[in-house]
Image (cartoon, rainbow, N blue to C red):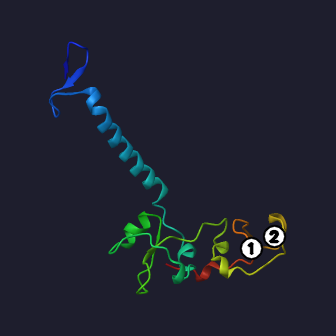
Amino acid sequence: MIKTAGGRIKHSAGCPGCSGADMEPQSARLLAVILILGLCALVGGQKPSPCQCSRLSTDNRKNCGFPGITSDQCFTLGCCFDSSIVGVPWCFHPLPEQESEECVMEVSARENCGYPGISPEECASRQCCFSDVIPDVPWCFFPESVKDCHY
């Protein structure tokens, strides 16, 4: 580093003629890339549960990978992997998590366990699952055994 007459610092090694101010945009971009990669690693990386993967019909699989992706790479992205069926995505987005694994299922698989307007408490008292995220489907529905879930 060399201090110029104007008080600016010149970096002589690696960037002859560059001042500290000249390097800031590059440093900021590098920092942004590192931050984004770190956040992606935190968001993904959790292997989904077997129910989140096996209960999703092949027709509803949304691609989460790239051709030739390995199961480890897919799980690192937080996605499901199943290469047993040709012609559908092998690495795909899982079903959403629920409070209980027994409640993880496609909306079309829900069997009504209540009535319109049932409260979460009344639904729970019936030993059923409750999710009011999607309109026009049963919000209180029977759970499914987790014994049928597998990778």
Query: At which x and y percent is residue 83?
Result: 41, 82
Is 18 rendered above or below residue 39?
above
Q: Nearer the viewer, mark 1 or mark 2?
A: 1
Q: Is residue 76 left or right of residue 122?
A: left
Q: Give the answer, above or below, for where 87 lies relative to 81.
A: below
Q: Secondary structure at mark 1?
A: loop
Q: Is residue 62 left or right of residue 144?
A: left
- At 80% from the left and 65% from the top, the residue drawn is 120
Instruction: Give the numbered dot on residue 123.
Output: 2
Query: The N terminus is located in which quarter?
Result: top left
Q: Which mark is residue 136?
A: 1
For this view, does 98 lie left or right of residue 32?
A: right
Amino acid type, label 1: Asp
Amino acid on which the number 2 mark rests in the picture? Cys
Camera-side residue of 40 and 102 = 40
- For marks 1 and 2 on the same chain, the one whose residue lies earlier in the sequence: 2
